[in-house]
Amino acid sequence: MEVMAGVHEKGAASLDDIIGSVRANSEFWKAGAIGIFIGVVRGQSLKGERVSKLELEAYEEKADEVLRGICRDLKKREGVVDVQIHHLIGEFDVGEDLVYVVVAGAHRNDLLPALREAIERYKKEAPIFKKEYTIDGKGEARSLWVSEEQ
C-alpha cells in the first residue's frame, strides 16, 4: 500500500479520513491499537507573549518527500502496521489543528516509540516554516518567522 503522508492546505485533510485510510490498510488486521498526535496552535509563544495566529508555509515537494520517508522508515519496525504524518499549511487561529500523526501498531510498546519518533523527526527534518503573530505585554503586535528567534 502507498505511503500516505504529506503537506496539505488547511481543510484538505481530516482526521476522520486519515483514520479511515489507516483502517483500510491491508495489514490493519495485525493492529491492536491506533495512536494519534494532534498538534494545535498554542496561544502563548516561547517568550510568553500571546499568540494571535500562525501562518505555516512549506517547501511542499521536499516536505512531502521527507514526511513519506519518515513514515517508510518507521513502518519497517517490528509491530508497526502503519504510520501517517499529515501537516497542514495556511493561516491558523489559536486552538486549530496543524498536524496529524497516526500510528497503528500491534501493541502499545510498538506504537508509542514510533509515534514519538515520528513527531520528533518531522519537527526537525521537514521544511515547514512557521510565522508567529504575537501581542506583547504592552499590547504591541508583531510577526516573526520562528526560525528567526532560534
Image: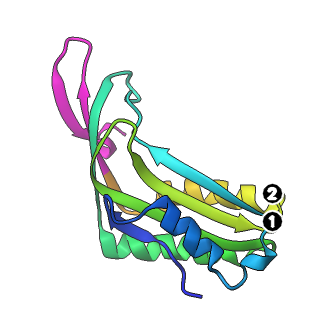
Near mark 1 (Cα within 10 A), the count class, few <14, some 14-19 or many ≥20, is some
Q: Do the numbered discs 1 and 2 sit on residues whose CB atoms are within 8 Å?
A: yes
Is residue 56 located in the magenta-colored stretch of the structure?
A: no
Q: Earlier in the sequence, mark 1 or mark 2?
A: 1
Quadrant of the image occupied by residue 79: bottom right
Q: Is residue 85 visible?
A: no
Indicate the amino acid at tag 2: Arg
- Relative to 86, say whether 124 is above or below: above
Q: Which residue is mark 1?
A: 32
Mark nearer the viewer, 1 or 2: 1
Q: Quadrant of the N terminus?
A: bottom right
User: In x, y percent, where is residue 72?
Assistant: 60, 78
Residue 98, percent across and down?
A: 40, 51
Q: In the rendered view, would you say 94 is above or below 102?
A: above
- Circle 1 — which element? loop
Regarding residue 113, the answer to whether it shows in the image is yes
Residue where numbered disc 2 is placed: 108
Asked whether, in this view, residue 16 is left or right of residue 46, the answer is right
Cα–Cα gap, marks 1 and 2: 8 Å
Image spot of residue 97 (x, y percent): 42, 48
Residue nearer the viewer, 148 or 37: 37
Residue at x 48% of width, y 70% of height: 67
Image: magenta residue range: 130-150
Which of the colour schemes (rainbow, by chain, secondary structure, one colour) is used?
rainbow
Horizontally, residue 52 falls left or right of residue 67, namely: left
Q: Position of residue 46 (x, y in %)?
A: 41, 29
Residue at 27% from the left image edge and 37% from the top image edge? 53
Q: Is residue 133 magenta?
A: yes
Farthest residue to the bottom: give it: 1
* Quadrant holding the C terminus: top left
What residue is at 19 percent from the left and 15 percent from the top?
139
Please give the label number shown on residue 86.
Answer: none
